[in-house]
Amino acid sequence: MKKACVIGAGFGGLALAIRLQSAGIETTVVEARDKPGGRAYFWERDGFTFDAGPTVITDPPCLRELWALKGHRMEDDIELMPVMPFYRLNWPDGTNFDYSNDETGLRDEIAKVNPRDVAGYEAFLDYSAGVFEEGYVKLGAVPFLDFASMIKAAPALAKYQAWRSVYSMVSKYIESEKLREAFSFHTLLVGGNPMKTSSIYALIHKLEKDGGVWWAKGGTNRLIDAMVRHFQRLGGTVQLGDAVTKIHSLGNRVTGLETKSGWQGSFDAIASNGDLIHTYRDLLGDNTHAARQAKALKRKKFSPSLFVVHFGIEGTWPGIPHHMILFGPRYKGLLDDIYSHGVLPEDFSIYLHHPTVTDPSMAPEGMSTFYALVPVANMGKLPVDWNEIGPLLEKRILDEVGRRLIPDIHSRIVTKFHYAPSDFATDLSAHLGSAFSLEPVLTQSAWFRAHNRDDEIPNLYLVGAGTHPGAGIPGVVGSAKATAKIMLEDLL
């Protein structure tokens, strides 16, 4: 039996490991942290459960497929609960917009903001459906290993004007600025600037419309736990709390690895779900090709980071939906500050996550779990001392949530903590503290992202947000499908 190792137990790593083990490859997952999940880590404090993220689950069929490979049912291991509305968008002037796939309800919401945009939305929906078919259904799990594969995809990209930004394409159909924000903000959830990210990412609207938005009962961490249990049921091995310190190579092949504890293993193939720069620079540091690759990757644009305030409070809040976007007074200007200028603005837009309105088990009885997330520039653009800035930004964010939703928020807080770019860098070895790896712009998409198989080390593979198609649960699960296809062709 051939043996493979997957470094990192994030969504991408676990999805890849399940596919390999299902196909008869003896697979070991090695994870540095004490729990699996990667960016989907979690904490339990004072009776509250806090998911690190991601919290938006879309396209459940891409997950069910992992169980179906060997005739199992995902529903036997995890319960997915529908979230409705998908998001409530709120602006400083008090305008609310409930975003969902309830066709009548969504058109009513659009009409309340600008009746003339109902027809424009219909045209945008047609566009979104087209790019969904071309960009996700046909290409979402395709490994772009050579430039010829990019050329093959070019006609479809040209047909849908992929060189335009999501915001630009939305603006072609929608005239209200609020609705332009409502139909373009999704790219922020995968690390992209709506003003610069390829319009192909408009497919997210169709993805959510068809598949819905879901919550895993008990938290995203329970979905990770279900994936681990399924992998182990298939015979796979998971090694937690033991960081890989070195990948061994001989000539143009990797031969095995060693960990912080001193454990060593020999493998026919190794796949990394870890940070791209960390993999090439730190784990393969004495390999000359890896050193060149790390240098080349460092020249690319990396996505922003995040600042997240987790808090548990007294009381229940049925009027606050599961997901809210609290837009600030600026949209383009704020994005410029984050993506281009590298400053910490006075204003911000907040993604507010309130899981207890769907799943009360996330908090003690009569209490609620929240997190408030704001995008911030990565540490390459914003080299501040987060130990100093963190507490100040945390208070500003809680003040804003209090001003707009929970007036006595500070007196209700039972427990709170924040997670900063420096934590992404420390806990996840994330280059520059980036939360989503490479920025999803057209010149860093498909073949221009990190390849699922290394170009010069034929038994070294990559999986996760830095590869095609990108960040988000469907993205990294699609990446795992693409990587597994190549690995199984090579190994079997």
Image: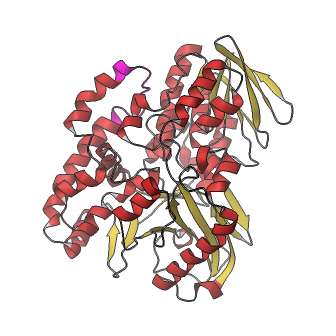
Image location (x, y in percent) of residue 461: 58, 25
Please give the range of residues in magenta. 136-149
Q: Is residue 137 magenta?
A: yes
What residue do we see at 49% from left, 80% from top?
Answer: 318
Q: Is residue 381 left or right of residue 101?
A: right
| Image coloring type | secondary structure
Q: Is the residue 103 above or below the residue 492 in the image?
A: below
Q: Is residue 412 left or right of residue 118?
A: right
Image location (x, y in percent) of residue 448: 42, 30
Q: Is residue 323 magenta?
A: no
Quadrant where the N terminus is found in the figure: top right
What residue do we see at 44% from left, 43% from top?
Answer: 61
Name the one closer to the observer, 412 or 230.
412
Residue most toward the top? 251
What residue do we see at 72% from left, 40% from top?
Answer: 31
Quadrant where the C terminus is found in the figure: top right
How many dots with numbers?
0
Q: Is residue 428 left or right of residue 337?
A: right
What residue do we see at 53% from left, 65% from top?
Answer: 373
Name the one closer to the observer, 370 or 199.
199
Q: Is residue 317 visible?
A: no
Q: Is residue 70 left or right of residue 154?
A: right
Q: Is the residue 246 above or below the residue 41 in the image?
A: above
Image location (x, y in percent) of residue 329: 37, 74
Q: Is the residue 163 above or below the residue 114 in the image?
A: above
Magenta highlight: main SS: loop
